[in-house]
Image (cartoon, rainbow, N blue to C red):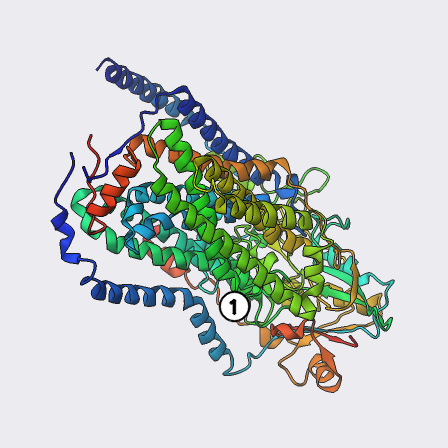
Amino acid sequence: MKNRALVIAGLSVLIFFGAIWADHRGTVPVPLVPTAQGHCVLPTALMRREHMMLLRRVREQIVRDGKHDQADRLTTCIACHVQTTATGASIPINQHGQFCAACHTYVGVHIDCFACHATVPQKAIPIADLGQTHGEQAAYRIPRVILQHAPALIARGHS
Amino acid sequence: MATMQYREIPGRSIAYWTALFACALLSVAGVAVGLYMRAEGHHVTGMNNQIVWGIEHVFAVFLIIAASGALNVASIASVFGQTVYKPLSRLSGLLAIALLVGGLWDLVLDLGRPGHVLDAIIYGNFLSIFAWNMYLYAGFLVITGFYLWFMMERRLNHYSHAMGVTAFLWRLTLTTGTGSIFGFLVSRSAYDTALLAPMFIIMSFAFGLATFLLILIGGFRALGRPLGDLIRGRLKRLLTVFVAAVLYFVVVYNLTNLYMPGQRAFEGFLLLHGGVFTTLFWVGQILIGGVLPLVLLLGKKGGTSRTLVIASAAVLIGGLAQVYIFIIGAQAYPQQLFPGMIVHSSFYDGVVNSYTPGWPETTLAISGVGLVGLIVLLGVRIFPFLPESLADQVTQAHAQNATAPHTNAITSP
Amino acid sequence: MSDERTELGSDEAPDQGHDPSRRRLLALAGGAVAATLMPGVTLFARTLSIGSGKTPVRFGLLVDTTKCTQGCNACVSACQDYNGLSKDPGPDNAQWIRKVTITDPHTGFTRSFPVMCQHCAEATCVDVCPTGASFRRPDGIVLVDKHRCIGCRYCIMACPYKARSFVGRVIKDQKPWAPRGKGTAEGCTMCVERVANGKVPACVAACNDKGEKAMTFGNLHDPKSEIAKSLARFSTTTIRADLGLRPGVHYRGI
């Protein structure tokens, strides 16, 4: 019985101080997310909520279905949102305080996108292209339907 | 009386706590090493792009096939009506679960991205024998769990026979699946044969029983509980048959390869000039794992605890050597992209690859064994898995009285 | 407490109870066999469905080994540059494409040519992958969907061409068009991002530019394509054609 009382007392203390600690953590200021120029594929409020869904959808389309011609793919997100240093070099998007990291650190959601994906845009392709084409582009590419699901999202009360 | 008494072990001795602590420490070390490998990448291990499955896979496959074999003792009692084995059924079930969990532990912690393991359930590829095995493993744990429950709960004893039959068929399917992980592969000279499925089943019989014997004899000695000649004699005969059967399969497997001209180079590698693999084959697999146990078991002192322990340990060592050759040796031998040609490339084509187990994957491999120990040690302390006595008069009376396999009493508290 | 009610189970006397229990055993055995055969059955069903017609596009390669020279490494370098791979051929580094030299010990016949993922129609890596991360696209390119890859390396065990590698290190500075990272399997992608933009794979471009013009890329299922015409005209083979995987990469002169 003595033990049980001790355990209950210990747990109460833990919960009490845990709550205080958590509350203290809660006062972390909302991060300053770097803003990009131009227009996003969806309104900001929608993107905040649904960007993962969009990225998941687009990654299936590109990787698995071979429909590479997508505006809302990760590389275009990065190209638009990446910050540059004074010398004009791109700052990795997952670096502290940058577009992806700023929010994800704040909300405590771990992402492993950048274990594989490049964190800065890159244009140069170091292969001599010689204008060679394989002539299959027309048959291969499908007409892009822009964000078929956007109306459905807006209808869910995000607007 | 004719009923068998089961009792939890007291578990207060220093030896018990030491063993428990050691096993727990090993298990935790496995998690630590798994996280380390995940953070650093597998370049910290001895594995590379030539040897992609290492010592932890050897242990994992060994534990998984031993798991299904360990359940055999219970199956013999339930399915084949050999009531003399009935008192061993509970330990058999517990050991089967522990061994399987230990094997899966090694497999999952070794993954490149262990956090994504549920993708196999979310997406799943039903063409993959690997994916099928995941269902077979999960089913095995559930079925064996129910089987144990039905055996230990008197009101449910009636169903334990049906559950035992289900478990037996399931474990045959499971080991077929494990063998087919390799048997279905056309890519390597050592695999690509339907023989692997039955061979894995018979290997599981031997490895599982040897593990079971070690734990039974060791446990009963540590507890000071009596273990009679009757049980020992029966288990000895079983082990003899299983070891001989494994040898038979090994002979058929190698003879078949020797007879096929295209496979002779591989056999030459395995039997003559494969360096460590040849040594492991002749000394480890054949001599220690096959000949030595047979000589010991068929000798005059075959049924004594001492001989059984030595023979079982030899079977396990030989078994590990066999699985090591089977997994590492198969990868070390060059893949045959151009049969009959001399092949060179920057990517080690045509080269016999070498592998030295690194400390991370070795720790991980052993941690699976530690987890098995942990589960067994905790299991026998919390639940009445072990009979109080397996002295001859007890087992004999029990076997004679038990007309049906589900008449055992539960433990007295 | 010991329980003596042995009669509870006596309705199953050994000599009479055998028949129903054996029947039950047989039924269960049937179920178990069906469960084991399931992958085979799905495989068979897929085989049937494939036979019905050709897809409009199947990308493939033709390597003319009579043109390829032993000293040339242009295709390999181009692949490494374009996809951001390491140039150091250590045992744990990936090599999506490699130059292989074969010599017949009896005749002295020798050839040097590149080997990469063969983009098989019946790819073993696709069949064995537990998550479906290894998959074949409608255009015939075999890829690893790294989003699903758990890093089990079964595809590497299953590939007869040594075409798959495992990333065992933290990777930085990837190319945006070639994502790759620690803990996943990878292999030749046939430069999907280039192909999607109407260009030929990097190795083919480099071979045409700096090499011996030994590689042709194109749609195997379009009879008017250059590659299909060459395949119809010359005697070609695939590596380990005996395995029946129907690779998309063909070789001439071996």
User: Is B81 drawn above or below residue B99 in the view shown?
Assistant: below
Q: Which residue is the site of mark 1?
A: A144
Q: Residue at x 13, y 41 (%)?
A: C4
The N terminus of chain B sits in image quarter: top left
Along the viewing direction, whichever of B156 and C138 lies nearer the viewer = B156
**Residue farthest along the front direction in this orientation:** B300
**Amino acid under disc 1:** Arg
The C terminus of chain B sits in image quarter: top left
Along the viewing direction, whichever of C50 and B298 lies nearer the viewer = B298
Task: State how many labels appear.
Answer: 1
- Residue B111 appears anywhere in the view: no
- Residue A77 appears anywhere in the view: yes
Q: Is residue B117 left or right of residue C114?
A: left
Q: Residue A105 in the image: x percent, y percent?
A: 50, 35
Along the viewing direction, whichever of C166 and B237 lies nearer the viewer = B237
Q: Residue at x 50, y 31 (%)?
A: B26
User: Is A151 drawn above or below residue B303 in the view shown?
Assistant: below
Give SS at disc 1.
loop
Q: Residue at x 25, y 56 (%)?
A: B162
Q: Residue C41 in the image: x percent, y percent?
A: 43, 72
Q: Residue B412 in the image: x percent, y percent?
A: 19, 32
Along the viewing direction, whichever of B186 and B389 lies nearer the viewer = B389
